[in-house]
Image: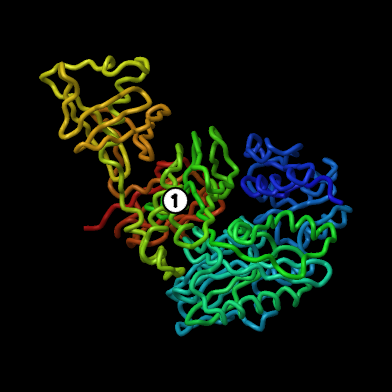
Amino acid sequence: MITSVLVANRGEIACRVFRTCRELGIRTIAVHSDADEGALHARVADASVRLPGEAPADTYLRGDLIVKAAVAAGADAVHPGYGFLSENADFARAVQDAGLIWIGPPPGAIEAMASKTRAKQLMGIQPLTHVTEADLPVLVKAAAGGGGRGMRVVRHLADLDAELASARAEAASAFGDGEVFVEPYVENGRHVEVQILADTHGTVLPLGTRDCSLQRRHQKVVEEAPAPGLPEELRQELSTLAVRAARAVDYVGAGTVEFLVADGRAHFLEMNTRLQVEHPVTEAVFGLDLVAQQLRIAEGHPLDSDPPRARGHAVEARLYAEDPSRDWAPQTGRLHRLSVPEGVRLDTGYTDGDDIGVHYDPMLAKVVAHAPTRAEAVRKLASALERAVIHGPVTNRALLVRSLRHPEFTAARMDTGFYDRHVPELTAPATDPHAPLAAALADAHTGSGSGSRFGGWRNVPSQPQVKRYGMAGGEHEVHYRHTRTGLETDGVSVVHADAGLVILEVDGVRRRFEVSRYGDQLYVNTTALTALPRFPDPTAQHAPGSLLAPMPGTVVRVADGLTAGTPVKAGDPLLWLEAMKMQHKITAPVTGTLSELHAVPGQQVEPGALLAVVKEAF
């Protein structure tokens, strides 16, 4: 029987596994990098072991250090989580060789399926070895790992070599394995997968389907179970293929078989020999704890011969610290507050006051809603996200809410090209027009006491007051006038105002605005604002054509032969930044000449750092 488990992972993943272990009375052990010393997963574990360093290659991808940590901490089992070494057969063997229980599939099964090239060969599918124009578009894909890393769509043959090199570098950084392959790219299919459980007694159970079609950069954003609108015959085919894949490698444990569904046909993608990020939707529908099932299987217990009955529908949204309007640029900084309404599930690796760093995936949390029908689950999740309190870096919250309410999604007509088609409309700025006024009123009462209504105002009745705020979509200027009878502003009456709460009446309807502030940053309900000086500094400008770092990260590559004086065309890739385990391409904004180049490989940069300047040709 397992009594103590080390989780060879971090963040939300480790916290999720720890939760089940605590419920079962199992001691928990964390590993943490130096960057994660104060992270939630390291704080909630019964014990933690430091992995010296910050980058994944020096810490969470060091199987030798993790095995030593497990032995030193007295663990009798290792759970790999998902990501990092979870699909590394050598790591699984090292765990077993150390006399520890491996909570996962046999190393041979991992070896057969963790490499997508070998998995496809096992299923009778051959990758492309020589790509021609007739094969386009194609998908360059990392042979190991997942999460959209090491994946590139290639539509022009001339781009293939560069995308291969970029994918290899990203895969090596994320998974410690730079092998990539090329396969045909199925346009606008649905991403459907089957959850399986298999024990050591020969039982393999398929636990329904999930739809994971809403993706950006080939990484899932919204997932649901069961996959809606599939004919029963296709559902049965998917389950049969999933069981066949598992039996082909004598699989044991929890795993997922993934497919693209297009034109009523199922195209095998891969088998993930681990638990998936989206496993909570299956748990909600089947009333199971999949981590508990993994532990029972590792202890040798048999599965029930029949799967439990599915009930209702579940939808999960991944909340990322990223800006979808700026090519999904990841964001860093202090997460001041994160909470969601009751009635939905929140899986996260962060608590209020934690810092979001540059070294790891930018996912903050997963929010999951379960209801009797799909429409009810979608409505419930959209409402919970809309009312969630998220104070900190920019997130994809607004995009998630709009996605869940988009007609294509509500009608279950989505596919993997959803965001390619709809990002502009889903990311258009939309802020409450009365939020800046509420912020100005609350600002005036900061430090004046909660019982005061207008004691903080210093006004000359004949002179309108002005405050400026930066917010999504640009700057907003507030004009108001204070008189003996109260505040005068166009069409708005002030019912109450103090430092934390403002109540405004507009056309006879009263609305509450809760205000929180962190330095110059304010949050009015869900609208983020930055207090600005009334007169901007005219010197805070950059030359036209300046390329600024959109995020903190590391310059990993500069285009071959690129120096000051090099002619460039608009859209040409100039350099690559790596941040949060992804590589981000920085391109020329205009056609002209590279007049300045400040970036060098290996350089650490902060947001807004000047990387290069392109002087436009006229």
> x and y percent of residue 597 in the render?
41, 49
Image quarter of residue 327 = bottom left
Q: Position of residue 130 (x, y in %)?
A: 56, 82
Q: Where is residue 343 in the image (x, y as percent from the top left)?
A: 53, 46
**Residue 172 percent across, percent down from the top left:** 63, 59
Residue 279 versus residue 416: which sits nearer the camera? 279
The residue pinned by badge 1 equals 329
- Left or right of 461? Residue 543 is right
313 relative to 265, above or below: above
Q: Residues within 10 Å of mark 1 (few under 14, many from 20)?
A: many
Residue 272: in sight, yes or no? no
- Viewer-proximal residue among 307 and 437: 307
Choose between 412 and 517: the one closer to the eye: 412
Q: Which residue is drawn at 54% across and 74% down?
A: 260
Task: Say which residue appears at 50% left-offset and 58% top-offset.
Answer: 221
Secondary structure beneath label 1: strand
Q: Is residue 282 visible?
A: yes
Q: List the single residue furthest toward the left.
A: 462
Of the pair 164 and 43, the residue shown nearer to us: 43
* Quarter of the figure that contains the C terminus: bottom left
Name the residue: 64% across, 61% down. Answer: 286
